[in-house]
């Protein structure tokens, strides 16, 4: 099956899908164009077009030349193309046998606009030199919702979806100037989508159509485990009222709340108590950044900062993705001990319990349990009996690190520690790798372990010559 390749920009008025043949097609031949989804684009039979057979998506948008059965041109003109497809033209005889079949690969280049979340607005561009009637209707839609509607010389906010209320704007005299661009305020990653602008005549016919792809990136902050703190940045030049409320949240918990010129610790989730800080005069300076103390991989979330007016309307919104790399500890077999570090805020509540587990490889094993002010050796797995130790005053210092004695290759795996009470929940993962002891052979032929700390015999291979 031979084929053509055609490329056009989104927004062109029409495109021709070529299909030429030197074959003489007999009377009664049926010509059928289909798209890649097997929808009928255009049907020609009995010397006339058959619009009742074509898919609604293509109704009123296709055209073929007359006298198609003579050797020559079966090309199809498609108005207002917006989607990339492979179109197939097939000619059938009266019995339904295929006489000819050709494909056309149509690529509609969609302009892409890319911004970082936190900008005050983004423009989806669309300009045309086509003369547009002043009674035309302009409609921007995303996948399925009306984003902005302009008709009868003014915007029609009652027609747009509530997700876009008070967030869209189009230029004045847009039908006269041909600038049909749309401005979208406070874009978030939830606005990442394909947007289509369609211009309709008073009768409802499509005069113009264009697609624009919007991608809103979420900025990412990445730090090594063990840092004292990390900052989630957010600055704005927008003038913010002094009675505004600023709220940072993770997936579902309040991380930090600022209102009435001060922090509101009673509103934040217990997991973030004593771990967050914001700058002074933040509404005046526009620096709404959040500092998170002693982050672990348990803090890997996408954080959202929202600024509300006194009436509760959203003035500003931004997301920041935090990635704290998992702590990795490496030791050679034969070492006296290895420490799995975990430091969090001090003065933890007295009812807090600490539990270290080995979660990979399966099955999951309890490594060390601390509860009610003391270790609980009867709860730990047999493999770890008499081999683990935690610091004294761990609730007071916040240092809940675990010391594992005489580590072997069997101890390699992923360890998880949880600090839990009625008021807090903190956790962290540590990947432990215990390397097997390297073996060398001395001049006597005896195999010895290089890393052994209990073998006092000097190795000949290590002596200088």
Image (spheres, rainbow, N blue to C red):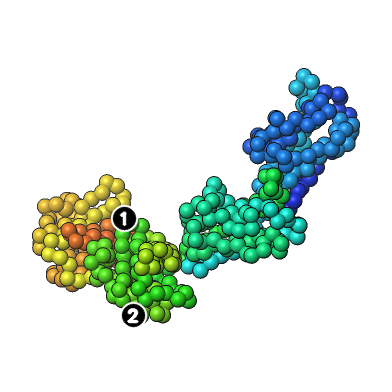
Q: Could you say whether the residue bearing mark 2 is in a helix, strand or loop?
A: loop
Residue 276 position (above or below residue 375): below
The spot of residue 86 in percent (x, y) is 69, 41
- The answer to whether 81 appears left or right of 68 in the picture is left
Which residue corresponds to mark 1?
Answer: 413
The spot of residue 358 in percent (x, y) is 26, 54
The spot of residue 448 in percent (x, y) is 30, 62
Q: Give the Cα separation between the discs numbered 1 and 2.
A: 44 Å
Residue 263's label in the rendered image is none
Q: In percent of the image, x 65 and y 36: which residue is there? A: 56
Q: In percent of the image, x 34 and y 80: which residue is there? A: 280
Near mark 2 (Cα within 10 A), the count class, few <14, some 14-19 or many ≥20, is few
Q: In percent of the image, x 31 and y 76: which residue is there? A: 261
Residue 451 or residue 289, whichever sits in front: 289
- The answer to whether 418 appears left or right of 192 in the picture is left
Residue 240 seen in the current view: yes
Label 1 or label 2, whichever comes before in sequence order: 2
Residue 25 or residue 241, whichever sits in front: 241
Near mark 1 (Cα within 10 A), the count class, few <14, some 14-19 or many ≥20, is some
Q: Are marks 1 and 2 in contact (CB under 8 Å)?
A: no
Which is closer to the viewer, label 1 or label 2? 2
Residue 211 seen in the current view: no
Q: In percent of the image, x 72 and y 59: which residue is there? A: 128
Q: Quadrant of the C terminus?
A: bottom left
Q: Number of labelled discs?
A: 2
The spot of residue 146 in percent (x, y) is 55, 51
* Residue lying furthest front: 152
Q: Quadrant of the N terminus?
A: top right
Q: Could you say whether the residue bearing mark 1 is in a helix, strand or loop?
A: strand
Which residue corresponds to mark 2?
Answer: 280
């Amino acid at each position: 099956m031979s084929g053509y390749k055609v490329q056009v920009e989104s927004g062109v008025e029409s495109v021709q899908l070529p299909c030429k043949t030197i074959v003489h097609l007999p009377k009664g031949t049926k010509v059928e164009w289909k798209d890649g989804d097997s929808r009928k684009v255009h049907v020609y039979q009995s010397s006339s077009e058959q619009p009742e057979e074509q898919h609604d998506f293509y109704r009123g948008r296709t055209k073929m030349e007359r006298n198609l059965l003579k050797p020559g041109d079966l090309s199809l003109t498609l108005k207002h193309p917006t989607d990339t497809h492979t179109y197939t033209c097939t000619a059938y005889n009266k019995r339904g046998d295929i006489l000819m079949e050709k494909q056309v690969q149509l690529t509609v280049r969609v302009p892409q606009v890319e911004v970082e979340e936190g900008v005050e607005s983004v423009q989806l561009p669309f300009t045309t030199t086509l003369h547009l009637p002043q009674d035309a209707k302009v409609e921007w839609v995303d996948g399925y919702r009306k984003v902005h509607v302009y008709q009868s010389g003014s915007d029609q906010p009652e027609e747009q979806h509530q997700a876009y209320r008070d967030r869209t704007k189009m230029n004045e005299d847009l039908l006269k100037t041909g600038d049909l661009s749309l401005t979208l305020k406070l874009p978030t990653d939830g606005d990442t989508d394909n947007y289509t602008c369609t211009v309709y005549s008073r009768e409802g016919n499509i005069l113009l159509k264009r697609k624009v792809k919007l991608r809103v990136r979420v900025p990412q902050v990445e730090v090594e485990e063990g840092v004292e703190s990390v900052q989630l940045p957010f600055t704005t030049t927008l003038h913010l009222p002094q009675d505004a409320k600023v709220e940072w949240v993770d997936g579902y918990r309040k991380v930090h709340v600022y209102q009435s010129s001060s922090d509101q610790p009673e509103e934040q989730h217990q997991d973030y108590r004593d771990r967050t800080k914001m700058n002074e005069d933040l509404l005046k300076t526009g620096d709404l950044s959040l500092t998170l103390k002693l982050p672990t991989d348990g803090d890997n979330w996408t954080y959202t900062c929202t600024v509300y007016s006194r009436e509760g309307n959203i003035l500003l919104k931004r997301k920041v993705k935090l990635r704290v790399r998992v702590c990795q500890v490496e030791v050679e077999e034969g070492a006296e001990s290895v420490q799995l570090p975990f430091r969090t805020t001090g003065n933890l509540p007295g009812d807090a319990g600490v539990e270290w587990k080995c979660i990979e490889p399966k099955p999951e094993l309890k490594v060390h349990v601390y509860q009610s002010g003391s270790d609980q050796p009867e709860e730990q797995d047999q493999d770890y009996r008499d081999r683990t130790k935690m610091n004294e005053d761990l609730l007071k210092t916040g240092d809940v690190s675990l010391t594992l004695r005489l580590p072997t290759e069997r101890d390699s795996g992923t360890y998880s520690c949880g600090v839990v009470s009625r008021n807090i929940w903190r956790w962290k993962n540590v990947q432990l790798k215990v390397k097997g002891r390297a073996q060398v052979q001395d001049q006597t032929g005896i195999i010895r372990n290089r890393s052994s700390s209990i073998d006092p015999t000097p190795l000949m291979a290590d002596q200088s010559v």
